[in-house]
Amino acid sequence: MKKFLLFCLGMMMCAALAACGGVSHEEEIKSSVDAYFAGIQAGDYEQALTAAADDLTDNFGLSEISNVANLTDETMGETYNSAANEFVKYFLQNSVKSYTIDNVEENEGQATVQISGSFIDAESALDGMNNVDMGTLFDEYAGEHMDELAQLAESDGEDAVTQAIIDACAPKLFEEMKSAVENAGTLETKMQMTLQENDGTWKITQIDEIA
């Protein structure tokens, strides 16, 4: 009987140790995913990247939205760049309409997360943005304000005229680009995120679209 009791106690201890070794980190993993999307939906890609590893591989394309939409140019002046930055933020804010974490699988410090959601049709949005004709906007403004610009050229030079046209047209330019984003529509898509645990913190290392 004593041996039997000792055997049972040993089995119980083994089971307890196994349970301790299999502690789920699902909430921490979900929290990292949520933090990433919170940054995207706030229009702040740098904030989103705080939930990702330094060597994040984004095969889904959210990083490309940030890169392609980055239209800032120091030579265009403060008014233009302010409007450009606001547009980039707007584009990101509208890139993820909604998402749901469908499944989390964890194995020895690595996790995969299945996500379904409604995302902007980025290709359609970019096509619409490319159809916005900056040159036409500038020409129309110059034609409507010819006398005013002629006086500016005489007093301050041609560079001042160019800057005045840019400053006047930039808000309308990016408003038209916002319209392209609004009209792009959405796609119901699935993605998979891979996360790696490092010193108790779960970081996204890869994002893939699921066909």
Image (cartoon, rainbow, N blue to C red):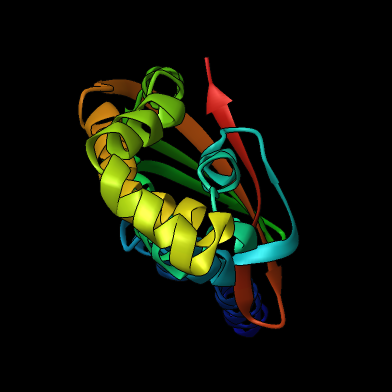
Is residue 26 left or right of 110 when viewed as pictured? left
- Relative side of 186 to 199, left or right: left
- 43 in relation to 14, above or below: above
x and y, in percent, of residue 144 in the image: 23, 36
The residue drawn where x is 41% and y is 41% is 103
| Residue 88 appears in the figure | no
- Residue 13: image location, x then y, percent: 61, 80
In the image, 6 versus 18, the foreground residue is 18
Does 158 appear above or below 47? above
Residue 149 visible from this viewpoint: yes
Residue sitting at x 65%, y 73%: 14
Left or right: 60, with 139 as reference point = right
Residue toward you, 148 or 16: 148
Q: 108 above or below 5? A: above
- The quarter of the rendered structure image containing the N terminus is bottom right
Q: Nearer the viewer, residue 20 or 65?
A: 65
Please, is residue 121 above or below residue 17 in the view? above
Residue at (47% x, 60% y) in the render: 154
